């Protein structure tokens, strides 16, 4: 049913994590690794791409009317097909710069969310092929994450993985190579930033941008009280007189701002445990919950989940890149890939 992935020096195979906030690409053969924001700047007058990734991110909130900042993925799925295609083409073209010969079209493995529809699945596949892929293999992101974290997902024992990304949080109980129970929550790192913006607006009448909100989250954000209180001076626009203003905020303020989304993630983990077969719950209790994704690095999130569920929580090594690492592993393991790949709609 599935094509076998070919391997020789002239054939290129790519692993891609197409995320709401970050896109990562790995080409194990050359050792190339790209990690850039999933953002594109478009010139509305000419419909031309001005910048992609980091170069486009620095324009956010500073762009004139003729420059449109596009985030082509919303909640982990393609919302703008054309821009996603151009984004992927940019990344695939970057890999060609490392080849001295006329590089052939690559085969790619891309992670997809658990609750993706057939139409959304086809959009990812078509965008990758239009961007220059020879073959496209789609694999569910929690499975890739577990493989990237070197977890034993093909065994009869359960692995519970909580992947807190940029646009979505995916909670999956994996065993025998598949998802036994799962929950998808369209709330993650972006929602953390939005809650911080809203809280500062309501409590301090100060309007701040999303880049500052992200900086606040990283520097003083936490899910549980910190041993030492932290403060941070921030600048924004006063909503009363419209003038620039500086205030000082504390980690306690940001913890209060984040309490709702953190609470929702914990509630969904509990809900996933409630529909998990009892034999597998026993495994999870013994082995703990594995926390991955960029937003897993929110200070104290692991401890907040552990307190609420009474189960140990472990943050995997380098949680940001587990999906792309899992996809890179599958590039050299065709047997495992054929067991877990999502059937192509083109076949």
Image (cartoon, helix red, strand yellow):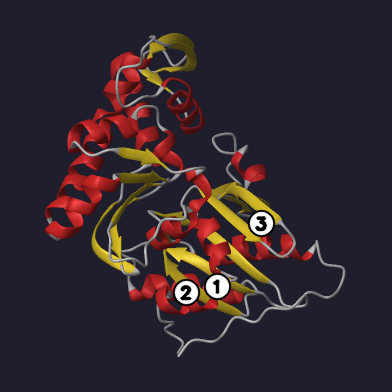
- Decide which of tag 2 and tag 3 comes sooner along the chain: 3
What residue do we see at 59% from left, 34% from top? 62
Which numbered mark, 3 or 1, is in the foreground of this view?
A: 1
Q: Residue tagged by mark 3?
A: 49
Label pair 2/3, CB-CB below 8 angstroms = no
Label pair 1/2, CB-CB below 8 angstroms = yes
Looking at the figure, which quarter contains the C terminus?
bottom left
**How many residues crowd mark 3 within 10 Å: few (<14), some (14–19), many (20+)?**
some
- In the picture, measured across the screen, residue 8 lies left or right of residue 190, that is right
Q: Nearer the viewer, residue 249 or 163?
A: 163
Q: Residue tagged by mark 1?
A: 333
Element on which disc 2 rests: helix
Q: Nearer the viewer, residue 254 or 183?
A: 183
Q: Is residue 264 above or below residue 274?
A: above
Q: Is residue 7 above or below residue 279?
A: below
Q: Residue tagged by mark 2?
A: 336
């Amino acid at each position: 049913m599935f094509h076998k992935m070919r391997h020789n020096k002239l054939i290129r195979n790519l692993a891609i994590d197409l995320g709401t906030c970050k896109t990562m690409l790995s080409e194990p053969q050359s050792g190339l690794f790209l990690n850039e924001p999933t953002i594109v700047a478009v010139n509305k007058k000419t419909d031309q791409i001005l910048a992609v990734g980091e170069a486009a991110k620095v324009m956010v909130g500073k762009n004139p009317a003729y420059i449109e900042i596009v985030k082509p993925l919303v909640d982990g799925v393609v919302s703008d097909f054309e821009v996603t295609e151009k984004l992927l083409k940019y990344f695939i073209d970057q890999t060609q710069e490392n080849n001295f010969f006329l590089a052939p079209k690559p085969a790619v493995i891309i992670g997809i969310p658990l609750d993706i529809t057939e139409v959304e699945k086809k959009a990812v596949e078509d965008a990758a092929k239009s961007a220059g892929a020879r073959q496209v293999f789609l694999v569910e992101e929690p499975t890739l994450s577990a493989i990237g974290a070197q977890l034993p997902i093909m065994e009869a024992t359960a692995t519970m993985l909580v992947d807190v990304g940029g646009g979505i949080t995916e909670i999956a109980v994996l065993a025998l190579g598949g998802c036994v129970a799962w929950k998808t929550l369209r709330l993650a790192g972006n929602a953390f930033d939005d809650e911080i913006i809203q809280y500062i607006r309501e409590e301090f009448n100060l309007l701040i941008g999303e880049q500052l909100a992200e900086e606040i989250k990283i520097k003083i954000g936490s899910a549980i009280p910190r041993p030492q209180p932290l403060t941070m001076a921030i600048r924004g626009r006063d909503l009363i007189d419209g003038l620039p203003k500086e205030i000082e905020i504390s980690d306690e303020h940001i913890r209060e701002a984040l309490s709702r989304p953190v609470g929702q993630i914990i509630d969904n983990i509990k809900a996933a445990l409630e529909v998990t077969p009892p034999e597998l719950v026993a495994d999870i209790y013994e082995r703990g919950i594995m926390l991955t994704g960029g937003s897993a690095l929110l200070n104290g999130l692991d401890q907040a989940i552990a307190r609420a569920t009474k189960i140990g929580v472990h943050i995997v090594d380098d949680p940001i890149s587990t999906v792309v690492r899992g996809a890179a592993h599958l590039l050299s393991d065709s047997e495992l890939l054929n067991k877990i790949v999502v059937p192509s709609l083109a076949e």
